[in-house]
Image (cartoon, rainbow, N blue to C red):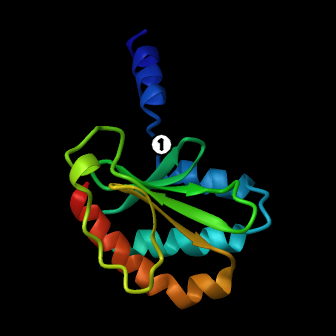
Amino acid sequence: MAAKTASKTSAKRGESTPADVETFLAALDHPLKPEILALRQIILGADPSITEGIKWNVPSFRTSEYFATMHLRAKDGIQVILHLGAKTRDTAIAGVAIADPGSLLEWLAKDRASVAFRDLKAIDAQGSALADIIRQWITYV
């Protein structure tokens, strides 16, 4: 009975593993799947402390907390939503300072932003800038 309770607890927290992401992506039928895979590699490659899981029914990325979630329902491309986990933080009022020389970030709140890519060409052109943003972002998590 204890194992069953532990399983329910993990499911409630939305905890998953990289294997769950692999399974999700293998089954994913999406017209922008190559873009999704490319963004996944950029985010995971930005820092060795970054891991992944399925959160909110999409690939999501974390260090100590989830900080990035793919938005796969956008009509004009793929978005990555950058956030600071589920807990309210001082950054909600103070904000976060992220250098963004390529103007990739669309700020949704003081501590929440979106990055959108239309296609692989855009991802290839701005992938290193995204990785720089990710490295800065995770310092706030």
Q: Is residue 49 above or below residue 86?
A: below
**Quarter of the image holding residue 45?**
bottom left
Characterize the local packing of mark 1: few (<14), some (14-19) or many (20 or more) Cα atoms within 10 angstroms. some
For image coordinates 71% across by 67% down, the residue present is: 33
Q: Which of the two residues, 125 or 38, is positioned nearer the viewer here?
A: 125
Residue at x-position 47% and y-position 35%: 14
Q: Secondary structure at mark 1?
A: loop
Residue placed furthest toward the bottom: 125
State the residue at coordinates (42%, 31%). Answer: 13
Q: Residue furthest top?
A: 1
In the image, what residue occupies the spot 47% across and 42% down? Answer: 16
Q: Is residue 7 above or below residue 100?
A: above
Q: Quadrant of residue 123?
A: bottom right
- Residue 52: percent from the left, percent from the top? 45, 55
- Against 125, residue 52 (above or below) is above
Q: Badge 1 is on which residue?
A: 16
Taking depth in this image into account, of 132 and 20 the one nearest to the observer is 132
Residue 1 image offset from top left, x and y in percent: 43, 9
In depth, the one of 19 and 103 nearer the eye is 103
**Could you tell me the amino acid type at mark 1?**
Ser
Would you place residue 66 above or below residue 3 in this image?
A: below
